[in-house]
Each structure stands twice: as structure tokens, then as C-alpha cells.
Image (cartoon, helix red, strand yellow):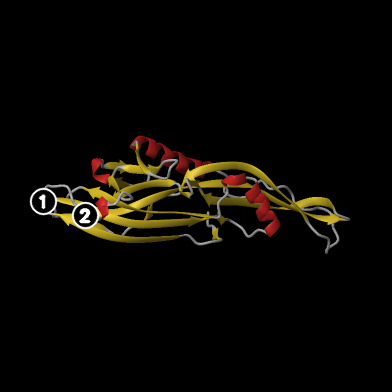
Amino acid sequence: MKFKQIIGGFLAFATVCSISLVQAPMASAQNDSPKTKVIDFASERNYDPINKVYVGAVYKPNKDGVLEKVDFKEYMEDVKKSKEQQKSLPQSGSSAPMSASKKIEEGTPPYSEFEKTGEYTFSKGLQKVSNTIDCRNVVSCSIAQNWSISQSYTVNIGLSREMFQKVTASVGFSWQYSASASSTYTFNLASGTRGYIAFNPKFGQVLGWAKTWKTIDGDPVGEPTTHWVDARYPLKVNGQLDGYVTFVHE
């Protein structure tokens, strides 16, 4: 389904490569900083059949916003569930109620409601957040990476301000207009590696019917005009964009 992007998301990245030609731990000014964390993508290499790529170890921010390694099977179960869920969800308003059958005078203020039919979470898909990193023909490779990613909400149709507020209110405090994640990490990669760092953001989704009635003397009359609504919004953990970080092999 093609979506109307209300606010654009963006990706930004800056990469500094530091390559060692000897079998020894790397020393750098970045590694001396207590804010710098080391992520060992080289500890695993697994095939992701959903995205049809090989990936390194997978990490996810914890409640404190610090990346922690997650089990690859757990990651794939989430990705698979997200894909199957999106396939099974209704994609249009094919079962909408009938249009108004009564002739109503124009010019009266409308009355609107949002009828929520479902609320879900899903993984959006791998988003590239670095340039291609080439660690071939070296003994070891460590990348000091300052990266950021930002994602924003989307909705499949244009909504009035009143209706949009009803949609966002239906998910309460979970709704986010946008969310971003950024940090500096040192990524350890295996010799012979070529690829890029990717982020798979977590999103919330609300589905339902936007219903609008014409009114007479303030009372809704007739059958409503209905529109199918599919609104998606980024999820946060500890104030930052939630999701998975991994290395995609090329």
C-alpha cells in the first residue's frame, strides 16, 4: 500500500574507519572515552531469510537506551511476525458502511468519530545508516561510528485536524510524531568483511474508520461518510527510537 508521507524521515551518518594490520586490540582516543561503547558484530554471522542478507550479531536498546546483544532467533521471530502480520491486515476500506442515503442540507458543521479496529507493533525493515565499510585484506578492523537515524509518522490519507487528534488519542501516550536515535560506538568487524551498519526501527500502527456525519441543529443525521485509516508511528525506548542494530554483509 502506498502511503502519503506527512513528515519525512531521514538518515544521517558519519564514519571514521580505523584499520589495524597486526593481531592486537586497537587503541584509539575514542576507546578511552567512557561514552564510547564497543559492539562486536564479528561474533556472529547469520542468514536473514526475510531480507535475504547475511548479518552480524544483532543489538537492541534496553530500557536505559544502551545497546545490548539479542538472540538472533528472537530477532528473526520478531521480523517474521511483523511481515506476516502486515500481510494479514486489511489493506483498504472494502467493508465500509454504505454512504448516506438521505439528502442533508449543506453548510452545517460535521460530526466525526474514529472507530479503531486494531492496534499493532512491527519492525519496519533494515535502514542503512552508514557508508559501505570495506575491511577486506586486513588482519582486523574496528570502526569508530557516529550515526543517527530519524523516523516520522505516516498516514494513508489526509485527515482534518479534529479527526487526526481522534486517531492519535486512540493510542494514548504511545503516539509519537517522530523519533530518532544517535550515538557513537566502536564496531568490531571480522577481517575480509564488507558491508554497512543497518537499523531496523520499531513502529506502532493503528487501523480504523474515520466517520463523518452531517448534522442538523448539532445532531448527526443519516449515514456517515467513511474513510479507511492506517496510521503508523515510531516507537521509543528511553526517549530514543526503538529498534535493532546490525551489520549487513555485502
Relative depth, front residue between 84 and 210? 210
Q: Judge whether residue 250 can be spotted in this image.
A: no
Q: Which residue is outermost to the bottom?
A: 107
Q: Residue at x 41, y 36 (%)?
A: 77
In the shown orientation, is residue 74 left or right of residue 137?
right
Q: Which residue is mark 2?
A: 28
**Quadrant location of residue 217?**
bottom right
Query: Circle 1: is it few (<14), some (14-19), or many (20+) Cα within 10 Å?
Result: few
At label 1, the amino acid type is Val
Q: Which residue is outermost to the left?
A: 22
Q: Secondary structure at mark 2?
A: loop
In the shown orientation, is residue 56 left or right of residue 175?
left
Relative depth, front residue between 68 and 100? 68
Image coords of residue 65 (percent x, y):
42, 45
Query: Answer yes or no: do the residues labelled 2 and 1 have beta carbons within 8 Å?
Result: no
Task: Give residue 22's mark.
Answer: 1
Q: Secondary structure at mark 1?
A: loop
Q: Which residue is outermost to the right?
A: 217
At label 2, the amino acid type is Ser
Rendered position, 4 above or below 96: below
Q: CA distance from mark 2 to mark 1?
A: 15 Å
Q: Residue at x 87, y 56 (%)?
A: 216
Relative depth, front residue between 15 and 33? 33
In the shown orientation, is residue 77 left or right of residue 221?
left
Rendered position, 35 above or below 75: below
Rendered position, 107 above or below 43: below
Image coords of residue 120 (percent x, y):
54, 42
